[in-house]
């Protein structure tokens, strides 16, 4: 753990926990306490990420993005799920995209040592599929929890319930959702946005990993050339 503190991960974890505590306090001030449970859950997850940081072969960027995705969800305290601060896209699309993207990066980074130097290989395709389905499983668990919450608590904000931001804009669309309970259309869009975020996260990691592997190969060849030249000076003539 001392090494993690030196890397600044401990500092990031402390700051993240303080942010969630602050959001809980703000929620009580503005009268929106529905996200208190999520904030507590995310504090526990932050500690989990911290204590398993090395097990996951995590990086500071992935650690930060994971928590950033959780923070975006908790900002629903300010009513963003009802009225998004970005008129062109709903807040739920943003939270699902940035919520799933870092999980794709996390799983990819965990398996990155399996990555081939050549980009288009069956081994790389298999790894990408494993990462995709692993990250999708996280998103599916969230959707299932939302369904369980709806059946237990009914409609409402927070604690994975079905509320603002989950419906279709317009009176007719809202009537359809009211008639069918928790909206399957909303779930479909959530899963679709999850997929886009996961694919984007994988794409980023593929570019990074391909570049690093290519650079490493160039370095390895450079080292071999140095050894060859040294051996030539000693009278050897065989190339590698």
Image (cartoon, grey):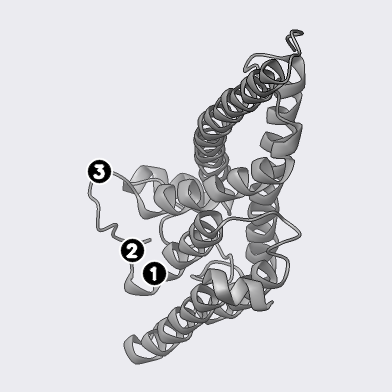
Callout 2 secondary element: loop
Residue 105 point in image, percent of width and height:
59, 44
Quadrant containing the C terminus is top right
Q: Residue at x 46, y 84 (%)?
A: 18
- Foreground residue among 197 and 179: 197
Look at the image and tell me whether residue 9 can be seen.
no
Please give left or right for residue 133 compared with residue 86 in the image.
Answer: right
Q: Which mark is residue 218?
A: none
Residue 153 point in image, percent of width and height:
63, 72
The mark nearer the N terminus, 1 or 3, is 1
Quadrant containing the N terminus is bottom right
- Distance CA(mark 3)–CA(mark 2): 13 Å
- Distance CA(mark 2)–CA(mark 1): 7 Å
Please give left or right for residue 152 compared with residue 92 in the image.
Answer: right
Return the residue at label 1: 75
Callout 1 secondary element: helix
Return the residue at label 3: 88
The mark nearer the N terminus, 2 or 1, is 1
Please give left or right for residue 104 compared with residue 48 in the image.
Answer: left
Callout 3 secondary element: loop
- Foreground residue among 48 and 222: 222
Return the residue at label 2: 80
């Amino acid at each position: 753990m001392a090494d993690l503190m030196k890397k600044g991960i401990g500092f990031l974890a402390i700051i993240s926990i303080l942010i969630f505590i602050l959001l809980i306090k703000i929620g009580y001030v503005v009268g929106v306490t529905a996200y208190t449970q999520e904030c507590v859950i995310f504090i526990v997850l932050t500690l989990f990420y911290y204590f398993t940081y090395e097990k996951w072969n995590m990086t500071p960027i992935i650690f930060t993005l994971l928590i950033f995705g959780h923070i975006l969800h908790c900002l629903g305290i300010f009513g963003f799920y009802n009225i998004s601060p970005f008129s062109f896209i709903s807040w739920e699309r943003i939270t699902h995209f940035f919520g799933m993207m870092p999980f794709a990066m996390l799983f990819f980074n965990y398996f990155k040592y399996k990555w081939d130097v050549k980009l288009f290989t069956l081994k790389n395709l298999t790894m990408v599929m494993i990462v995709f389905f692993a990250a999708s499983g996280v998103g599916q668990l969230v959707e299932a929890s939302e369904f369980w919450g709806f059946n237990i608590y009914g409609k409402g904000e927070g604690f994975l319930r079905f509320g603002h931001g989950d419906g279709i804009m317009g009176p007719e669309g809202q009537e359809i959702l009211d008639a069918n309970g928790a909206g399957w259309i909303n779930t479909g869009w959530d899963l679709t946005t999850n997929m886009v975020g996961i694919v984007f996260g994988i794409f980023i990691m593929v570019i990074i990993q391909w570049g690093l592997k290519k650079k490493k190969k160039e370095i390895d060849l450079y080292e071999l050339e140095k050894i060859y030249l040294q051996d030539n000076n000693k009278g050897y003539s065989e190339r590698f």
